[in-house]
Amino acid sequence: MHARVARYAIEPDQLVDAVEGFREAGRELAELEGFQGGHLLIDYDQGALLTFTLWENRAALDRSEVRAAGLRQRALREVDGEVQSVTRYEVPFALG
């Protein structure tokens, strides 16, 4: 399994509005082959938002790159946020 973690900077007063944009982006991402799930993480105090998506394998993660980048930008458009980083990881096992 592989993961992509993206960190965003969004003004704290825009985070509630950002959630809906990411909810819609998540629905579209979930339709891609190899998608295994994901989470949206928010720190309301710092104005930080993270997305964490899981992919069946490296090939699925690679195939999703272009679509995921477009969905990130679209989700941020209404809240004037920015992508701070996008990092890819191998997931050797799940906790729990």
Image (cartoon, grey):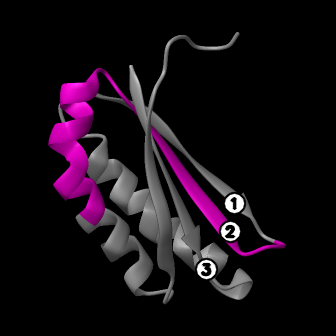
For the point 71% across and 86% down, which residue is it?
13
Please say whether residue 1 is visible from this viewpoint.
yes
Residue 58 forms part of the magenta stretch:
yes
Disc 2 versus disc 1: nearer the observer: 2
Residue beneath disc 1: 42
Tell me whether the residue at label 2 lies in contact with that at label 3, contact meaning CB atoms closer than 8 angstroms.
yes
Image location of residue 51, percent across then percent down: 52, 52
Q: CA distance from mark 2 to mark 3?
A: 6 Å
For the point 49% across and 62% down, which residue is it?
85
Tell me whether the residue at label 2 lies in contact with that at label 1, contact meaning CB atoms closer than 8 angstroms.
yes
Front-lying residue, 57 or 32 = 57
Image location of residue 53, percent across then percent down: 44, 40
Image location of residue 58, percent across then percent down: 26, 26
Residue 95 forms part of the magenta stretch:
no
Badge 1 density bin: few <14, some 14–19, many ≥20, Cα 10 Å:
some
Q: CA distance from mark 2 to mark 1?
A: 6 Å
For the point 43% across and 34% down, which residue is it?
3
Residue beneath disc 2: 48
Task: Specify the label residue 10 is tagged with.
Answer: 3
Task: Specify the label residue 63 is tagged with.
Answer: none
Q: Amino acid at mark 2?
A: Ala
- Give the residue furthest to the right: 45
Q: Amino acid at mark 1?
A: Ile
Indicate whether 42 appears above or below 12. above
**Residue stretch in magenta:** 45-69
**Image quarter hosting the N terminus:** top left
